[in-house]
């Protein structure tokens, strides 16, 4: 794809995006607006309870949305800027991330940010000479719009990771929990969505493809999510922020497509060169064995 074709594709996509009623919740701005707005914590609470159900000792009833920006603890340690960070009434800390761009070491990335959250919970009072390391439980909930190779052998949507004893697997330590939701593996149709969890995951993956909010996806929490995702409700600043994210995604995919085509073309050239080299080697080998021109010509007709 040359540069002119690339720009044409981007303009077509931009025209199509402009006609959509709901924003893609996979992008930062609408995701944070729907789930990270102070005073509108119900969608976040419902999402945490639905996706962390098997990991929670008790349902979450209230959360306090915190500043997602964590300053690095040392000069050489970079800062962390999370999508959403909050804590519940029991003191547990929660990180919620939406990731559209594929990353090779995303599990380690999630562990890194979870560690940052643990370190940030240390007492800041300089009068305290020590810390007993009894930090609050940390949960990292990660929504992925791509797949990870480690799980390519199954279609499970939600994967929880935690510290366990390899000798006694029933012994589990719940102070650090990583949960990955593979939205790319959620394949239920709208008619098949019965639980709130199913309806939530369907909305996260498909809201931007809908012309209207369907009756199956109605309800107090889902109504708030769709209201937040409605492009007509965006301020001019929010819309500009959203479109910057959309264009960035288009650019990234255009670059990926171009790299693929460039790689395929390079592969064809390399393959042809290798084929010629192999052919030359075969001919020289037959000549060394005493075959004549006509014999070699006949043999090469039938041999790969």
Image: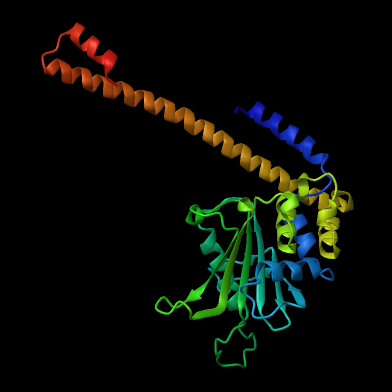
Q: Measuring from the top left, give residue 106's x and y in whole percent.
A: 54, 59
Decide if residue 26 is on the left or right side of residue 167.
right
Is residue 145 visible to us here? no
Quarter occupied by the N terminus = top right
Residue 89 image position (x, y, % from top left)? 73, 82
Task: Residue 121: tell me if it is visible.
Answer: yes
Q: For residue 117, what is the image quadrant?
A: bottom right
Answer with left or right where residue 59 lies relative to residue 281.
Answer: right
- Across and down, in percent, residue 66 comes to 73, 73
**238 over 253 or under it: above or below:** below
Residue 140 occupies quadrant: bottom right
Which is more toward the observer, 251 or 298? 298
274 vs 219, nearest the viewer = 219
User: Eyeballing the image, is 104 above or below 76?
Assistant: above
Residue displayed at 71% across by 59% down? 198
For image coordinates 71% across by 35% down, the residue present is: 10
The image quadrant of residue 17 is top right
Q: Position of residue 294 (x, y in %)?
A: 20, 6
Identify the residue at the far top of this view: 294
Residue at image coords 43%, 26%: 268
Which color scheme is applied? rainbow
Q: Nearer the viewer, residue 207 or 245?
A: 207
Q: How many marks?
A: 0
For residue 65, side relative to residue 117 (left or right): right
Look at the image and tell me in which quarter the C terminus lies: top left
Q: Residue at x 77, y 47 (%)?
A: 208
């Amino acid at each position: 794809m040359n540069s002119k074709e690339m720009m044409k594709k981007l303009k077509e996509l931009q025209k199509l995006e402009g006609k959509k009623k709901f924003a893609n919740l996979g992008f930062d701005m609408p995701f944070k607006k729907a789930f990270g707005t102070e005073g509108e914590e119900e969608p976040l609470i419902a999402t945490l309870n639905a996706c962390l159900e098997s990991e929670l000792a008790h349902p979450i009833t209230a959360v306090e949305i915190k500043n997602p920006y964590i300053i690095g603890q040392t000069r050489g340690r970079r800062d962390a800027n999370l999508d959403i960070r909050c804590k519940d009434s029991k003191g547990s800390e929660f990180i919620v991330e939406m990731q559209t761009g594929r990353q090779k070491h995303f599990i380690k990335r999630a562990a890194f940010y979870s560690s940052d959250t643990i370190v940030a919970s240390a007492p800041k009072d300089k009068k305290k000479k020590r810390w007993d390391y009894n930090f609050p439980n940390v949960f990292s909930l990660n929504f992925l719009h791509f797949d990870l190779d480690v799980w390519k052998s199954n279609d499970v949507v939600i994967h929880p990771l935690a510290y366990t004893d390899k000798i006694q697997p029933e012994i589990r330590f719940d102070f650090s929990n990583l949960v990955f939701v593979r939205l790319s593996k959620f394949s239920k149709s709208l008619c098949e969505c019965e639980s709130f969890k199913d309806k939530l995951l369907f909305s996260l993956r498909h809201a931007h493809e809908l012309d209207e909010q369907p009756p199956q996806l109605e309800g107090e929490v889902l109504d708030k999510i769709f209201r937040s995702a409605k492009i007509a409700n965006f301020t001019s600043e929010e819309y500009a922020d959203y479109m910057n994210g959309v264009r960035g995604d288009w650019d990234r995919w255009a670059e990926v497509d171009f790299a693929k085509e460039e790689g395929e073309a390079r592969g064809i050239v390399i393959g042809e060169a290798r084929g010629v080299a192999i052919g030359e080697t075969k001919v020289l080998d037959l000549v060394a064995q005493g075959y004549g021109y006509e014999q070699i010509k006949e043999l090469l007709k039938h041999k790969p």
